[in-house]
Image (spheres, helix red, strand yellow):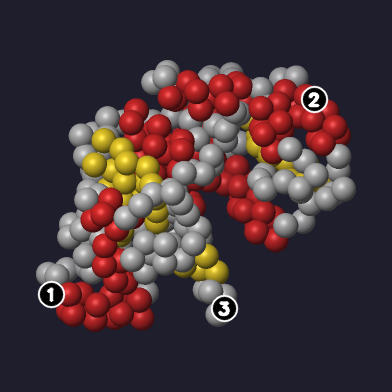
Amino acid sequence: MLAIRYNARSFSSLKTTMNKSMNPAPAQILDGLAVSAAVLTSVHEAIAAHVRAGGQRPGLAVVLVGEDPASSIYVRAKRKDCERAGIQAGDFDLPFETSQAELLALIDQLNRDDKIQGVLVQLPLPPHIDEVAVTNAISVSKDVDGFHAFNVGRLALRQPGLRPCTSRGIVTLLNYYGIRIKGRHCVVVGASNIVGRPLGLELLYQGATVTTCHRFTEDLAFYVRHAEVLIIAVGKRGVVDADWVADGAVVVDVGINRLESGKLVGDIDFERAAAKAAWISPVPGGVGPMTRATLMQNTAEAAGIDVAEPIMP
């Protein structure tokens, strides 16, 4: 059985909140670090078997424009994941001043490179570059982020190709712990092109009944209270009050916010939400690692390599 480890201080705080709410136990943890490691192991094993059979090792081109600190940290983590998965990473670090034409020329070159099966351009891009034009310039068959309009459209039509990494990673995380999605009411708070919209399509593909809430939604609390599976993806601390969470709900927190102390937290108060929920994902250590691991899975599949879904031991 998977061992769940709690930081002593966090667990003490969680117990205090639990006792105040009269809940019998705090939520169980959706451990993205453990599940992403299982995904990377599956990818590594599938690639190793592919190479032993005479196949080519997959290559992933990671393009970073500028020196945004958060993007730089994230890209370094992706490159480490490539090592763990057995994927050959190609690093393309470009200066902030790179023009859109220069970036599109590089993408065209990578699209035609037979040694590269996946192309990833780290977002956000500098303001002088059109992100939509860049995303849609990547070959559909190499769009391992799953953001190309064609791939998102395929998911909408229930003909999925390469699926957006965060939404697919969330489904993998829930499946790993045996949490049912089909037929359940899933409420997504946030409708961005990167997470919220593709996530709604992914959940529909999985057979869920989906409500997507956004900045124009009236009475957000009403919808949150009726969520069996609540997924928050806004990037704004406190956008959902933990008191709104239904007893026994599943809470997946996609948001990442940095407090003045430097601590990373999600969009919802973890301790208070955990006192009501049955399952909850932490920040950090929840959805983030799943997004990166799914990128490796997509890269392998772009190379024609089937990757087995991990199963909880």
Nearer to us: label 2 or label 1: 1
- Residue 260 marker: 3
Q: Answer whether residue 53 is visible to the viewer in this image.
A: yes
Disc 1 to disc 3, C-alpha distance: 32 Å
Residue at 76% x, 48% y is: 127
Mark 1 or 3 closer to N-term?
A: 1
Residue at 66% x, 22% y is: 139
- Residue 109 marker: 2
Disc 2 to disc 1, C-alpha distance: 60 Å
Q: Count every numbered label the image shows and give the total.
A: 3
Q: Secondary structure at mark 2?
A: helix
Disc 1: CA contacts within 10 A as few (<14), some (14-19) or many (>=20): few
Q: Secondary structure at mark 3?
A: loop
Q: Is residue 5 above or below residue 167?
A: below
Q: Is residue 175 above or below residue 139?
A: below
Q: Is residue 194 left or right of residue 181?
A: right
Q: Secondary structure at mark 1?
A: loop
Disc 3: CA contacts within 10 A as few (<14), some (14-19) or many (>=20): few
Give the amino acid at mark 2.
Gln
Q: Is residue 100 above or below residue 152?
A: below
- The location of residue 116, given as percent across then percent down, is 69, 27
Tag 3 and tag 2, C-beta contact below 8 Å: no
| Residue in the foreground of this view, choosing between 62 and 103 | 103
| Residue in the foreground of this view, choosing between 79 and 262 | 262
Give the amino acid at mark 3.
Glu
- The location of residue 240, given as percent across then percent down, is 37, 61
Give the amino acid at mark 1.
Met
Residue tagged 1? 22
Q: Is residue 160 left or right of residue 206?
A: right
Disc 2: CA contacts within 10 A as few (<14), some (14-19) or many (>=20): few
| Residue in the foreground of this view, choosing between 27 and 114 | 27
